Amino acid sequence: MSGVSLFIGIILLLAAIHDFFFTTLGSGAGFVSRNISVFSDKIIQVFVKFIGRKAYNYNGLFVNLMILFYRLLLIWGRLFLVFTSNPEAITNSSGRISNHWE
């Protein structure tokens, strides 16, 4: 299980890093960022039905926050998979092996 967790975590982390650099340095959005921006646009369309066209004023902010939230949360989760693949690698100051919450 630990080898599988490490492999999946590294592959997903590399995909997130690729998407980040393709989005920031490339000519357009990466494959994940593009899907998140399309999804957030659909959410804005729902808000337009309830609030009105004033919701479009927050479209850019909402898309950027959704992409930032994706990057922070999922990169943290992917690093969690990498670090939990070897529980003995992370210890506290007294040398005790940390649990998942620590």
Image (cartoon, rainbow, N blue to C red):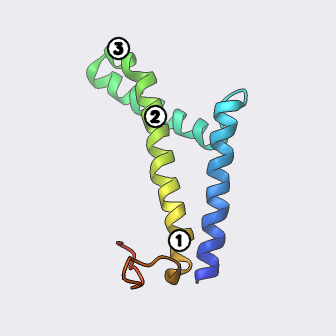
Residue projecting furthest to the front: 94
* Residue at 62% from the left image edge and 41% from the top image edge: 20
Rendered location of residue 89, percent (x, y): 53, 79
Depicted 102 relative to depicted 60: above or below: below
Is 47 on the left or on the right of 77, as rendered?
left
Is 19 on the left or on the right of 52, as rendered?
right
For disc 1, the marked residue is 83
Whichever of labels 2 and 1 marks the residue nearer the N terminus, that label is 2
Question: Residue 40, which numbered label?
Answer: 2
Rendered location of residue 58, percent (x, y): 37, 21
Q: Amino acid at mark 1?
A: Phe
Whichever of labels 3 and 2 marks the residue nearer the N terminus, that label is 2
Residue 29 showing in the rendered view: no
Is 24 on the left or on the right of 90, as rendered?
right
* Residue at 63% from the left image edge and 68% from the top image edge: 8
Q: Nearer the viewer, residue 74 or 54?
A: 74
Within 10 angstroms of label 3, few (less than 14), some, or many (20 or more) residues? few
* Residue at 58% from the left image edge and 38% from the top image edge: 33
Residue projecting furthest to the left: 51
Circle 3 — which element? helix
Closer mark to the observer between disc 1 and disc 3:
1
Question: Residue 53, which numbered label?
Answer: 3
What is the C-alpha distance between the residues marked 1 and 3? 45 Å
Rendered location of residue 65, percent (x, y): 42, 34
Closer mark to the observer between disc 2 and disc 1:
1
Closer mark to the observer between disc 3 and disc 2:
2
